[in-house]
Image (cartoon, grey):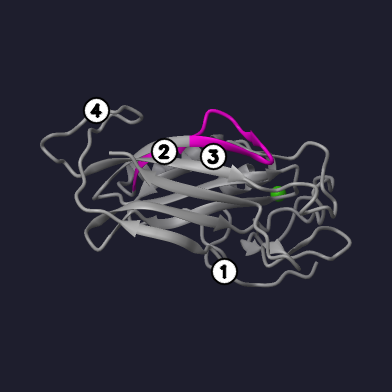
Amino acid sequence: MNRLFALSCSLIVSTLALSGCGGNDSGSSSNDPQGQGEVQYKLTFTTLWNAEDFPQGFPSNPHFSPLVGATHNEQTVIWRPLDQPSTTGIEQVAETGGTSLFRAELQERKTQGYVQNILLAGGGVGSPGETVLRFRASEQFPLLSIISMIAPSPDWFVGLRDVNLREGGEWLESATFNLALYDAGTDLGVAFTSADSDGGDGIIRLLSSDVSDTDFNNGVHRSSGLYVATMQLQREE
Ligand SMILES: [Ca+2]
């Protein structure tokens, strides 16, 4: 396999707003008049992968697995290309869409004080399509990392990592991120519908493939530069 190495997670819109407030009941709309520094965000996951724009090897049942991730602090890395090998939890998500091992890893980091909220969507989403996940964040755990498997695929996924919701002492108001496609490095398959083939160096890289296998180079369409998905964050309270 010829895999190119690069990083990409482009922030295309970002605005900031003042002050943070909110309750601490995940998913609720309760207010926090005493200002304990918690806020709620709406994450909109828009899947753009479609047969017209990405025809090479496009499968018959395109979808993305349930979003899974966490709000966390700077003392832990949930996933990071090139720098940190895929955990068994990442491998499970990227290969099967299952979240049990990954959530167990996040729970352990929560016990260690690195993670606050473990995020899990209720289901997957077709592509093209859209799904929404709401979550809360606090000043002590202002980073967001979250992933979803593109499916079917050998071990390919999209996600956000280390998005700082509170840069410079202010909560992020809204932002939209283009999501490049990553290879978890845990399966040797080269096409969306390749049979399972366990192996690889476990290093997370932007997906690059042969022209005959997929349209992807460095995680985007090799000629159009199109992305397979976006995530939009909107602060709600
Ligand atoms: Ca594997």
- The alpha-carbon separation of the residues under discs 4 and 3 comes to 24 Å
1 and 4 marks in contact (CB < 8 Å): no
Q: Is residue 109 left or right of residue 85?
A: left
User: Where does the magenta region start and end?
Assistant: 115-132
3 and 2 marks in contact (CB < 8 Å): no
- Residue 193 in percent (x, y) is at 83, 45
Q: Nearer the viewer, residue 109 or 214?
A: 214
2 and 4 marks in contact (CB < 8 Å): no
Q: Quadrant of residue 47?
A: top right
- Mark 2 / mark 4, whichever is N-terminal: 4
- The alpha-carbon separation of the residues under discs 1 and 3 comes to 21 Å
Q: Is residue 112 left or right of residue 232?
A: left
| Res. 30 mark | 4
Q: Residues within 10 Å of mark 2 (few under 14, many from 20)?
A: some
Residue 25 vertical placement versus 63 (above, below): above
- Mark 1 / mark 3, whichever is N-terminal: 1
- Mark 4 / mark 3, whichever is N-terminal: 4
- The alpha-carbon separation of the residues under discs 2 and 4 comes to 19 Å
- Residue 30 in percent (x, y) is at 24, 27
Query: Which amino acid type is shown beneath numbered disc 4?
Result: Ser
Is 130 included in the stretch rendered in magenta? yes
- The alpha-carbon separation of the residues under discs 3 and 2 comes to 11 Å
Task: For mark 4, give the secondary structure.
Answer: loop
Q: Quadrant of residue 81?
A: bottom right
Q: Nearer the viewer, mark 3 or mark 2?
A: 3
Residue denoted by label 2: 118
Residue denoted by label 1: 7
Residue denoted by label 3: 67
